[in-house]
Image: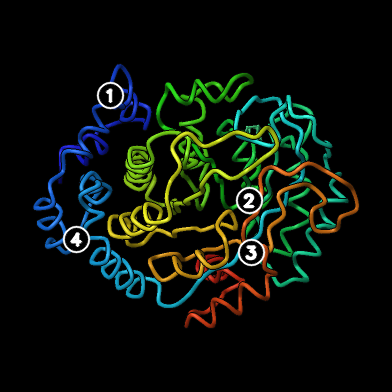
């Protein structure tokens, strides 16, 4: 095991790992470490045949870009070996776009003058029935962070109503306490997604201009609190474009490794969201190119052969179709990024622009055309229900 792997194993929290690495000039040192990798080290790494978190420095380096075709072949073959040709489809359901935070890049930023809407439990249930009719059985409940809307009580009530409709209900809402996650799990939530946005503390402070989200440490501990409560799966990622994407991806890999080692009963999935246009007109200071996105996906597949890798409708259709064979095992489809986005009963501001605007049926057809099977239902749930 590498020194980094040992450090992750010994740490009690992920904050203990990431803090010393990124603070007080640490971010620049991580950048230098990636830049300093020679091609010979990449070749030696690829010859190993099995990889761990310490190898991400090599696989995410500029030097590894020179071996991307070889890395992509390895990633594709590992994915087929571990997952076969299955791609699980899910859909986000936005229940509220009220937010108290001032995230510079987000359409829901409290200072943006966009139509605000919080769905009642009945309205959210009606919206979810439309998603059920489209075929979805995995739903991700999303909301802005606000003390009055999308509260734990609201989510518990909504999830109780939805759990007969969906095989999997995940949430992407404000970071909660462990006991609050326990309440959601008891109601029927089985997944929690929380993007750190960036692991660079300086950029994090620069783009989170106000509101509770300014607290980096509280956010970085979110998935540990959910895992301690017993959640079945967690999803993580940076938001690519805010800071150096190679370093952010490396840090996300450390985060995934920490959760995998310390909470082995919880499945870790990794997403690859790139910043998209939104109200407020924020321009990504460190845009992630398509080739870089492919390199990150392949690197994660090699280091985390059993993790679900997720690609959302932030990416355009043609690119999603091309990236799929590299290691993607979950995709969103037909997404709308505002409350009431499926029924269009009310007008509401969007969080960001969706790039893949195909219908759910069109996405499923494209997956089939590529030789893969679109799956609407996670059979793990059935297995767990009968096996316990
Ligand atoms: S990213 Fe989340 S917390 Fe920040 S403004 Fe948007 S909805 Fe609110």
Please, what secondary structure does the residue beneath circle 3 have?
loop
- Name the mark on residue 50: 4
| Callout 4 touching callout 1 (CB < 8 Å) | no
Which residue position holds label 3? 333
The earlier-in-sequence mark between 3 and 1 is 1
Q: Is residue 218 left or right of residue 296?
A: right
x, y percent for residue 182: 60, 40
Q: Which residue is at 44% across, 58% downward?
A: 309
Foreground mark, 1 or 2, reads 1
Q: Is residue 267 left or right of residue 343?
A: left
Which residue position holds label 1? 26
Foreground mark, 3 or 4, reads 3
Under 8 Å from ligand 1: the CB of mark 1? Answer: no
Please, what secondary structure does the residue beneath circle 2 have?
loop
Q: Which residue is at 40% across, 28% downward?
A: 200
Q: Which residue is at 56% across, 46% downward?
A: 192
Whole-angstrom CA distance, mark 2 to mark 4, is: 34 Å
Out of 102 and 130, give the one closest to the viewer.
102
Which residue position holds label 2? 189
Out of 387 and 376, give the one closest to the viewer.
376
The earlier-in-sequence mark between 2 and 4 is 4
Whole-angstrom CA distance, mark 1 to mark 2, is: 37 Å
Whole-angstrom CA distance, mark 3 to mark 4, is: 32 Å
Q: Is residue 326 left or right of residue 385?
A: left
Foreground mark, 3 or 2, reads 3
Out of 376 and 60, give the one closest to the viewer.
60
Q: Is residue 150 above or below residue 296?
A: above
Whole-angstrom CA distance, mark 3 to mark 2, is: 20 Å
Mark 3 burial class by Cα count in 10 Å: few <14, some 14-19, many 20+: many
x, y percent for residue 310: 49, 58
């Amino acid at each position: 095991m590498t020194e980094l792997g040992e450090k992750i194993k010994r740490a009690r929290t992920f904050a203990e790992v990431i803090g010393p690495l990124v603070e007080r000039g640490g971010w620049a040192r991580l950048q230098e470490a990636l830049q300093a990798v020679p091609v010979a080290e990449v070749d030696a790494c690829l010859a190993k045949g099995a990889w761990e978190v310490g190898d991400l420095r090599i696989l995410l380096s500029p030097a590894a870009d020179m071996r991307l075709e070889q890395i992509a072949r390895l990633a594709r073959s590992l994915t087929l070996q571990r997952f076969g040709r299955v791609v699980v489809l899910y859909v986000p359901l936005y229940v509220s776009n009220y937010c108290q935070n001032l995230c510079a890049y987000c359409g829901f930023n409290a200072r943006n003058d966009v139509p605000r809407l919080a769905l009642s439990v009945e309205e959210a249930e009606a919206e979810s029935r439309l998603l059920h009719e489209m075929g979805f059985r995995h739903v991700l409940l999303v909301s802005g962070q606000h003390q009055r809307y999308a509260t734990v009580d609201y989510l518990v009530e909504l999830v109780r109503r939805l759990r007969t409709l969906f095989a999997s209900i995940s949430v992407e809402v404000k970071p909660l306490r462990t006991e609050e996650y326990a309440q959601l799990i008891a109601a029927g939530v089985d997944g929690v997604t929380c993007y750190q946005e960036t692991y660079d503390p300086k950029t994090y402070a620069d783009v989170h201009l106000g509101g509770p989200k300014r607290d980096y440490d509280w956010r970085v501990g979110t998935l540990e609190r959910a895992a301690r409560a017993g959640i079945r799966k967690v999803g993580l990622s940076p938001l690519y474009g805010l800071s150096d994407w190679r370093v952010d991806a490396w840090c996300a890999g450390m985060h995934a490794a920490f959760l995998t080692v310390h909470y082995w009963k919880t499945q870790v999935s990794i997403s690859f969201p790139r910043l998209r246009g939104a109200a407020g007109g924020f321009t990504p200071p460190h845009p992630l190119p398509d080739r870089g996105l492919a390199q990150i996906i392949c690197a994660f597949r090699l280091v985390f052969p059993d993790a679900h890798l997720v690609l959302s409708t932030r990416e355009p259709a043609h690119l999603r179709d091309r990236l799929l064979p590299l290691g993607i095992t979950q995709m969103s489809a037909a997404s709308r990024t505002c409350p009431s986005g499926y029924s269009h009963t009310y007008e509401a501001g969007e969080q960001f622009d969706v790039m893949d605007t195909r219908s759910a049926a069109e996405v499923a057809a494209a997956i089939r055309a590529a030789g893969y099977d679109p799956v609407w239902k996670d059979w793990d749930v059935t297995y767990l229900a009968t096996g316990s």
